[in-house]
Image (spheres, rainbow, N blue to C red):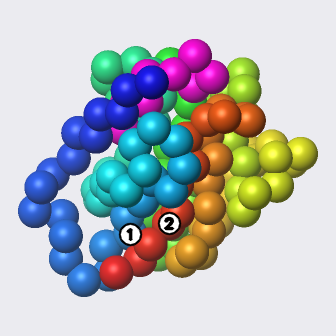
Amino acid sequence: MQFHAHTDADAHASGTPRLVCIGGSHHGHSVAIPPGGLSIGRARDNLLIIVDGSISAHHAWIGIVDGGVMLRDYQSLAGTFLNADLSTRVGDALLADGDTIHFGGEGGEEFRLVIE
């Protein structure tokens, strides 16, 4: 499993939402969510590339919508899940500081949303 984050290095301002990897092969890595949002998936045109068979080419997107942090699953095959509830797939969800996001079902990468 490989993890590549392609984001703007100077996006560390106070109040910036970030994803911190808390489970999986890249535990501890973090990535800021840029103003245009963060595309997530296996394909190289995503900003957050997770090379894992359980992750779809264009799996999900996280961005700021109307002042809140929104998660959108792109009808991925293995799904996106919130707060350790692996029985309920997420389509669109408004996220809160501390929420956990699990991409790709059992054994996939898990991230925590942190708003600094």
Disc 1 crowd, CA 10 A, few/some/many (<14, 14-19, 20+): many
Is-magenta flag for residue 78? Answer: no
Mark 1 residue element? strand
**Within the image, what quadrant is residue 108 found in?**
top right
Q: Observer-nearest residue: 101 or 26? A: 26
Q: Which corner quadrant holds the C terminus?
A: bottom left
Horizontal side, residue 19 vs residue 9: left or right: right
Residue 110 horizontal/vertical position (percent): 57, 49
All told, the count of numbered labels is: 2
Q: For the point 43% across and 50% down, which residue is it?
A: 27
The location of residue 23, given as percent across then percent down, is: 54, 50
Seen as rendered, the residue at the extreme left is 10
Q: Residue at horizontal 89%, vertical 45%? A: 87
Q: Are marks 1 and 2 in contact (CB under 8 Å)?
A: yes
Percent x, y for residue 36? 32, 51
Residue type (three-letter) at the residue carrying disc 1: Pro
Residue at the extreme right: 87
The amino acid beneath tag 2 is Leu
Q: Secondary structure at mark 2?
A: strand
Magenta residue check for 52: yes
Q: Dot 2 corresponds to which residue?
A: 113
CA distance for labels 1 and 2: 7 Å
The reply to whether residue 31 is visible in this rendering is yes
Q: Residue at x 72, y 48 (%)?
A: 81
**Sequence order check, earlier mark of 1 and 2:** 1
Q: Residues within 10 Å of mark 2 (few under 14, many from 20)?
A: many
Q: Nearer the viewer, mark 1 or mark 2?
A: 2
**Residue 43, quarter of picture:** top left
The segment highlighted magenta reads 48-56
* Residue receiving disc 1: 17
Is residue 65 visible in the rendered image? The answer is no
The quadrant of the picture occupied by the N terminus is top left
